[in-house]
Image (cartoon, rainbow, N blue to C red):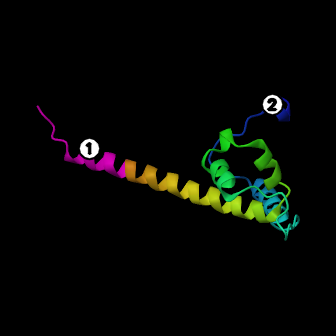
Amino acid sequence: MPLASKRRKKTGRKSPTEKALLGYLKQRLSNDFPNPTRIGCPPLEALERNAKDPIHADESVSKHVGRCSPCYRVYSRLLREELARIRQQASRHNSNRDTHKKNKKVVK
């Protein structure tokens, strides 16, 4: 079977090579595209919308983020915050579901 057609088992973990590449890209995007006067930067609200709904992101905002280190850093922070919010909601939901199961009486 050709190497390209082999599927990697999804474990939720990144390989050391993937981690290194992502770290390199993050470093470059964070620092290599200075824009001290913030020329052409979208408003914060546009970055927030893209972070809250990346699947339906505004393409022009996404392109700008890839060319502007200050916007990339803000967008990255917004994404981390959104992910933390989603995880917290999921944790609360699971905790409530488990509590509900424990409190249910078994009728025989």
Residue at image coords 26%, 45%: 100
- Label 2 packing within 10 angstroms: few (<14), some (14-19), many (20+): few
Point out the stretch of residues depicted in magenta: 94-108
Residue at image coords 68%, 58%: 44
Is residue 27 rendered to the left or right of residue 47?
right
Residue most toward the left? 108
Residue at image coords 58%, 60%: 81
Question: Where is 9 relative to 81, above or below?
Answer: above
Q: Give percent across and percent down for residue 84.
A: 54, 58
Residue most toward the top? 1
Is residue 24 rendered to the left or right of residue 86?
right
Residue 5's disc is 2
Q: CA distance from mark 1 to mark 2?
A: 43 Å
Residue type at mark 1? Lys
Q: Secondary structure at mark 2?
A: helix
Residue 60 located within the stretch drawn in magenta:
no
Residue picked out by circle 1: 101
Q: Quadrant of residue 29?
A: bottom right
Magenta segment, prevailing SS (helix, strand or loop): helix
* Residue closest to the eye, 66 or 104: 66
Question: Where is 11 relative to 17, above or below?
Answer: above
